[in-house]
Image: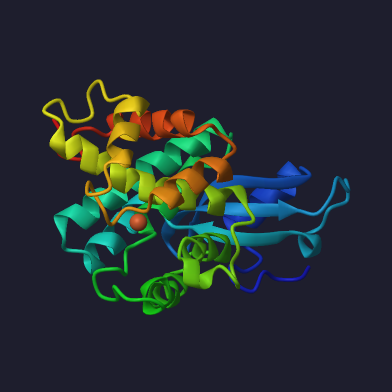
């Protein structure tokens, strides 16, 4: 039996895998080095004689609590924390919509700008953070998704997965929808895509938010712009009080 370099042969994950023997990828809750973790297990095929040597534990997943602690360790700004919560909500919403892993996508949303307060300039923003995320055990799929949301990393980490495309698609739009919510007396309540689009036409309103990136985002997730905006509004309405609107 070939030991797993990171987790050893006696880990609960390996014992679990011995019994499951399912083709493809699955997730399980386990304990790694005394800490609760969600791990992703990759099964190479439907071989009924699957052995430990053909099983890889691909990653362990940072919990939402750990991600929040990491975010708040590096980010003191209330508006940046709210931006992280908004992007997390949008990522969780789209993960459910696309039948993807809600917890993993949520962690990507929560952490995508966690290093911005300390390293606001390219290319340190995202790259300084990636080194820390790797040190803290976040797996490469999530680290590289976070890297890919910055234009200056896209030669190395292109927008070629649904996770990466969705993060890019919701980032600017979350910022814009939040800006619209701040100037509406009812905030997010009753907000419609057309009210957001009207604001997009006002060049002076939230001028730092790229309209081009918002429109590109809708294309990246394969939706008409109004539908994409509606998804993000719905996601943010779901965390209304966390965003300070209730
Ligand atoms: Fe962001």
Residue 156, quarter of picture: bottom right
Q: In this picture, is 46 found above or below 197?
A: below
**Residue at image location 23% in from the left, 38% down from the top:** 180
Residue 39, quarter of picture: bottom right
Q: Position of residue 159 (x, y in %)?
A: 59, 57
The answer, for residue 104, to whether it is visible in the render is: no
Q: In this picture, is 109 found above or below 158?
A: above
Q: In this picture, is 102 found above or below 6?
A: above
Query: Dividing the image into four equal quarters, which quarter contains ligand 1?
Result: bottom left
Between residue 18 and residue 135, name the one nearer to us: 135
Please identify the residue farthest to the left as the structure is shown: 185
Q: In this picture, is 159 found above or below 127?
A: above
**Residue at image location 16% in from the left, 60% down from the top:** 77
**Residue at image location 20% in from the left, 35% down from the top:** 181
Between residue 118 and residue 226, name the one nearer to us: 226
> What is the tally of numbered marks visible in this picture?
0
Question: Left or right: 158 with respect to 125?
Answer: right
Please identify the residue farthest to the top as the structure is shown: 190
Between residue 100 and residue 31, name the one nearer to us: 100
Query: How are the colours assigned in the image?
Result: rainbow
Q: Where is residue 47 in the image (x, y as percent from the top left)?
A: 88, 48
The answer, for residue 160, to whether it is visible in the render is: yes
Residue 71, quarter of picture: bottom left
Q: Where is residue 20 in the image (x, y as percent from the top left)?
A: 72, 42
Instruction: Locate the N terminus by quadrant.
Output: bottom right
Instruction: Locate the C terminus by quadrant.
Output: top left
**Residue at image location 64% in from the left, 74% down from the top:** 5
Between residue 165 and residue 93, name the one nearer to us: 165
Q: Where is residue 22 in the image (x, y as percent from the top left)?
A: 76, 42
């Amino acid at each position: 039996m070939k030991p797993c370099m990171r987790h050893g042969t006696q880990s609960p994950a390996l014992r679990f895998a011995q019994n499951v023997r399912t083709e493809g990828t699955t997730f399980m809750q386990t304990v790694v080095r005394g800490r609760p973790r969600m791990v992703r297990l990759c099964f190479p095929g439907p071989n009924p004689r699957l052995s430990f040597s053909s099983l890889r534990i691909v990653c362990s997943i940072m919990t939402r609590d750990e991600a929040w602690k990491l975010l708040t360790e590096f980010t003191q700004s209330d508006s940046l924390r709210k931006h992280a919560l908004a992007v997390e909500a949008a990522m969780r919403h789209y993960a459910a919509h696309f039948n993807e892993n809600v917890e993993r996508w949520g962690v990507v949303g929560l952490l995508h700008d966690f290093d911005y307060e300390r390293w606001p300039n390219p290319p340190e923003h995202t790259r300084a953070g990636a080194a820390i995320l790797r040190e803290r055990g976040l797996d490469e799929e999530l680290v590289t998704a976070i890297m890919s949301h910055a234009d200056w990393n896209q030669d190395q980490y292109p927008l070629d997965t649904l996770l990466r495309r969705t993060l890019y698609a919701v980032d600017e739009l979350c910022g814009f929808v939040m800006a619209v919510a701040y100037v509406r007396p009812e905030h997010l309540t009753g907000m419609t895509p057309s009210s957001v689009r009207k604001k997009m036409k006002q060049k002076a309103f939230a001028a730092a938010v790229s309209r081009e990136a918002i429109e590109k985002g809708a294309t990246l997730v394969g939706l008409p712009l109004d539908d994409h905006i509606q998804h993000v509004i719905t996601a943010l309405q779901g965390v209304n009080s966390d965003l300070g609107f209730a």
